[in-house]
Image (spheres, grey):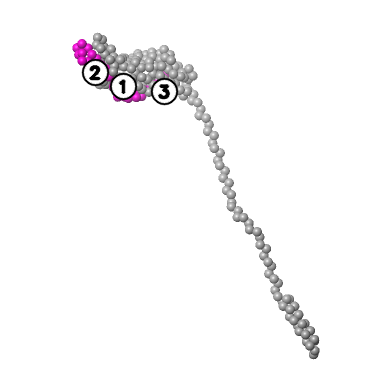
Amino acid sequence: MTTTTTSRQFAFLYLCLMFSVVACAPPPAPTATLRPPQPTRIPTRIVTLAPTPTLAPSPTPTLPYALAPLLGTWLVDINLQLREGITFDDVRFFGTALVEVALDGALSGSVEFYPTVLQPPCVTAALDPEPIRATLVGDLQPAEDGGVIANLRFVPENAAQPTTLRLACVEFPEGIVLSDPIFWEAMRAADLLTLRVPLRLGFQRQSSADLSGISGGALYGTLYTQVRVSR
């Protein structure tokens, strides 16, 4: 056998081995196709708010009387006279209450009382530098005759405020000075801290109370009261 023949045989065997390996080899595994990353979805919660309730306007109260003619400021003159006291025979207190009527029928206001004393032939004087003050609260009430009653309540600025009076006579020229809270004590004893008056122009009323009896001896004399209504 020649050298050329041997080389051809070797080449033929080599090719046979190569084709056999290729034919027997397993097919290549498929390459996975990578998907692009997807964004994470966060669930969205939808909250429905309840509608804000609409407040209905408060109805205007129906009053059993005509309020329009009563609106505004009223004047209530209140004059008190304490007679036949132990030391002083005639002590007077003059006051004018300013009463305001509101749209709902409520009453508010204020009053100042100024004291004076008379006892001739003696020389007298009221020594208090400030008047006796009070605020007023209350409401309106229909009357049986078709009118309107003002229920007023006095709220003293100082329930213990004294009234200071001086008296000088021939018998005791050195004078006597008395300082006691007689005003509010007399008003309380006579049940005048609450005042009921018809809210009518020109109304007047007079009354009296024996303080010696109703105060249990704490006060002496008779308290005369005069009330007059105007605008």
Q: Is residue 183 magenta?
A: no
Q: Nearer the viewer, mark 2 or mark 3?
A: 2
Mark 1–mark 2 Cα distance, whole angstroms, equals 19 Å
Q: Dot 3, crowdedness within 10 Å: few (<14), some or many (≥20)?
A: some
- Pointer 1 or 3: first along the chain: 3
Name the amino acid, label 1: Trp
Q: Residue at x 77, y 82 (%)?
A: 12
Circles 2 and 3: CB atoms closer than 8 Å: no
> Percent x, y for residue 35?
66, 60
Q: Which mark is residue 184?
A: 1
Determine whether 109 is above or below 25 in the image.
above
Name the amino acid, label 2: Val
Could you say whether the residue bearing mark 1 is in a helix, strand or loop? helix
Location of residue 141 (image quadrant): top left
- Pointer 2 or 3: first along the chain: 3
> Percent x, y for residue 145?
43, 16
Q: Which residue is mark 2?
A: 177
Q: Which mark is residue 108?
A: 3
Could you say whether the residue bearing mark 2 is in a helix, strand or loop? strand
Q: Which residues are magenta?
A: 149-177
Name the amino acid, label 3: Ser
Q: Camera-side residue: 141 or 178?
A: 178
Location of residue 118 (image quadrant): top left
- Pointer 1 or 2: first along the chain: 2
